[in-house]
Amino acid sequence: MEFRLLGTVSVDTRRGPLPLGPAKRRSLLAALLLSPNTPVPTHRLTACLWDDEPPSRARSVIQGHVSRLRALLAEGDAEAYGVELLTAGDAYALRLPETLLDAQRFEELLTLAREQRDPADTVLMLGDALALWRGPALGGAFAGPPLQAAAHSLEESRLSAVEQLALAYGRLGEHHRAAAVLRTEAVAHPLRESLSAALMTALYQAGRQSEALDWFHRTRRLLADELGIDPGRELADAYGLILRGDPVPELLVPRAAAEPARPPVPPRPALVPAGAHADLLPRAPRGFHGRGPELAALGRAAAGEAPVCLVTGPAGVGKTALALWWAHRNADAFPDGRLFADLHGFSDTGEPSVTEVLREFLLALGVPPRRIPESAAAAAALFRTLTDRLRLLVVLDNARDSATVRALLPGGADCVTVVTSRHRLEGLIASDAARPVPLGTLDARDGTALLAGVLGEERVLGEPVAARRLAELCGGLPLALRVTAARLAGRPQWTLAHLADELADERGRLAQLAVDDTGVPAALRLTLQHLPGEAAHHFGRLGHHPGTHFDPYTAAALSGTDPPAAARALERLGAAHLVTETAPGRWELHDLVRLYARDLDPASGPQALTGVLDHYIATALAAAETAQPGGEPCFALPADFQRPSAVRDFADRAEAMGWLAAERDDLARAVTAARAAGLDDRAWRIILLQWPQVVWRSRDNWVPLLSTALECAQAVADPYAESRVRTLLGWVLSEEGRLADALTLLEPSPDLARRTGDRLGEATALINLAVVQSAQGDLDAALTHCARAATLAHEEGNPHTEMLALLHLSRTHLASGAPEQALRVARTALDLGPEHEEAARTSLLHTVCGEAHLALGDEPEALRLLERAADEAESTGYDEGAVRALEALLRVSGRADHRKRHEAAVRRLAAEES
């Protein structure tokens, strides 16, 4: 249950919003919520419901509304949340935990934000506070004088929070973001001088001096026309500072690096929105049998306060199946959702980092990507705070150590965590009172029931002794039993006794294999012996795959075959339960099966790894070329490159980008395997070829991977590779606002490219370097580098890169106060196109032209060009360009349709980034 004042007055429940009815009832509720847990006299309620002489029966009307509110709250299970509407003499009080009130959480977040020393934490908390607003405060209520005053006070708090958010962005050096935040509010509140002064300062710091001055004159005219007054001191001081080119006061610059630091206070965001339900749980296992005592023990362990349930046992014993079966049977106990993570603690493909797991959890709980902290400690604190008042199930599968689990525990007393592990994790028992649920092998009866579930009861009842013997020979391990049952199901002419005899003969010999449980290798070995040689060959090579999943193209690269042959082999392996198809054309290996497969042919490992690495290079190259035709970078393939027999074809940009996103984790694992094998020449190529995804999602934590690419390039002493990687990494750093780091990375890049004759690489490096220099105020250097980049691209006959260079050159001219030159350069760039793939860039160029005409005083032509730029951007789905063009239009037109389109584009952009 959640009570809302920051927007339409409402009460949200799990069944949906309560039907509050007429405005006066909402006014009554609002008046009670503005003084929670405090008696509100009838005369104050009367003043809220009527702004003139109240009717003679006002008291009866109020009593009627109170009675109806009580009934509505009861329907919404108010008692379960500690909510009660009380009568106290001639007053009424709404008793509730104040955490259920959005206005209270808003004020709490503002208080926490003011306590932070790190501006990044301040941004996070203020963003969460402002996200609580869903429209003007106290919407839908009758606006009596007391409620009007309360709504005004809440709005003042919101605007103050906006100004604080802009200040925090300024301390981070993200002045463009500060300006974007302030501009929206300054347009809505044109006479609020503090907003206009802050916006002018942010624009000035962002290198947009002309826009800042334009905003001053716009505000000055409004003050004169509407109020007949001159600008106040705050606005005048900002104007004078910009005219003089003075540095910004200390209040808006980052604190000195030498200032003693203290750990940031963990953010405390709002709860998951009412009705939200996070569910990452895989489907329930099929054919689950037995485990009655263990299920009961798990239920008892989960009944305590904030319990951690620890399911332990040997590999293949069915720990995951037990946890998932129990989770699905008890879904109703966790109305806020169920989270699941496979920690791969016993996998040779590598464990996901704690930050990666927390990121998936936080995304599932509704946290936008840009609000997720980068550090594991901060992300864990955010997760604990977010789950503090939830009833949530967290399943952590295949945990290797206690420390990893501790970082992923939720914070709520009503949350349950189920951990599965091959280790006892005694440290978790000691530190977090984890309750062990040991899982042994299936007894013969349950093992026989599992066989009957696959083979049918009639076949098992026909040979009860042999069925029991098979269950015993499989060691009671569900994995071994399922593989054995699959072999029998495909051979109805076989007797159970025959297979039992065969399994018994092999058991001793296979016990020496380096696998934990002899039952599993015996079953796998016998299954493999009855497969065609082609399937067995593919199976052995799949064990050398560095990733977690594969398709026929990947399997073919590992095996040195072609995709059709690999697809046939995968179908046979899937029928034998040696691989699992998790989605159409997407397969996985169980951890134990992977180890077994790898040991079948260890000598083929290097060849299989090189094959799959080169498959990734070829496929990523095809994806990059489809996603961005004519884009950069391209490179020569390694001298010993093993060209795959076939490379996947991508129909369009969406499909190519989808593949790059889906394969991101496995590409990272491939890079790790390549580095371990000394194949750095493959590693940097695999990373660099993800550049369309990097550009599209520049703030999605690419820095660590690109830093690895830089290390690889330097390890093989390849200046071409080093230049390309520096150029891309520097651009990502600049997008993250780390301008000093970006400059350090980018400065050597043009020279490295020049030494290798990579003229287009040099041009791209110069453009990215110029972007950073312009952001830091070094406009002369930025102009020089953009001009040089345009010349190089023109001489190489590459209009794509030339157009990009001219775009930034024109922007820099505009920022430096030279609109004539900006207009000339932008027109030159437009003459190079427009090709279809340059539609977004054309929109940006028309925006620059429009802004240049504004600076030159030609308002009609400016409006025409900006309107065209907005239309182009909207027609191609380029929301960032639409926002920029419409912002420029709003500076001069103020038309309602422009404002509406701008707001729609901002909403689309925010949804895309989240």
Image (tube, rainbow, N blue to C red):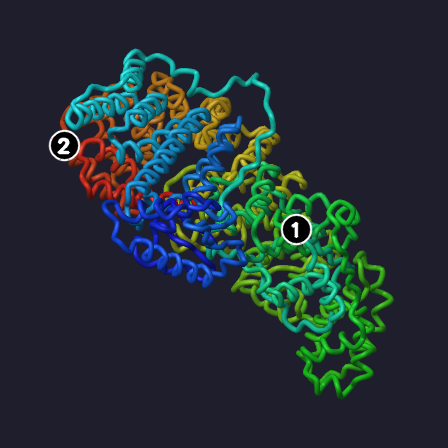
Q: Which is nearer the N-term, disc 2 or disc 1?
A: 1
User: Callout 2: few (<14), some (14-19), or many (20+) C-alpha neighbours within 10 Å?
Assistant: some
Q: Residue 795 appears at what percent x and percent y? A: 33, 28
In this picture, is 130 found above or below 658? above
**Residue 861 tag number:** 2
Q: Which one is nearer the viewer's eye here, 136 or 875?
A: 136
Q: Residue 529 appears at what percent x and percent y? A: 73, 70
- Measuring 30% from the left and 32% from the top, which residue is drawn there? 183
Q: Secondary structure at mark 2?
A: helix
Q: Which one is nearer the viewer's eye here, 468 or 759?
A: 468
Q: Which one is nearer the viewer's eye here, 589 or 847?
A: 847
- Please name the amino acid that badge 2 sits on: Glu
User: Callout 1: few (<14), some (14-19), or many (20+) C-alpha neighbours within 10 Å?
Assistant: many
Q: Secondary structure at mark 1?
A: loop
**Where's the C terminus, which quadrant?**
top left
Is residue 791 visible in the rendered image? The answer is: no
- Measuring 54% from the left and 42% from the top, which residue is drawn there? 686
Q: Residue 551 appears at what percent x and percent y? A: 55, 59
- Please name the amino acid that badge 1 sits on: Leu
Is residue 147 visible in the rendered image? The answer is: yes
**Residue 343 tag number:** 1
Q: Which one is nearer the viewer's eye here, 91 or 629?
A: 91
- Measuring 27% from the left and 16% from the top, which residue is drawn there? 236
Query: Relative to residue 475, is residue 549 drawn left or right?
Result: left
Q: CA distance from mark 2 to mark 1?
A: 59 Å
Q: Are marks 2 and 1 in contact (CB under 8 Å)?
A: no
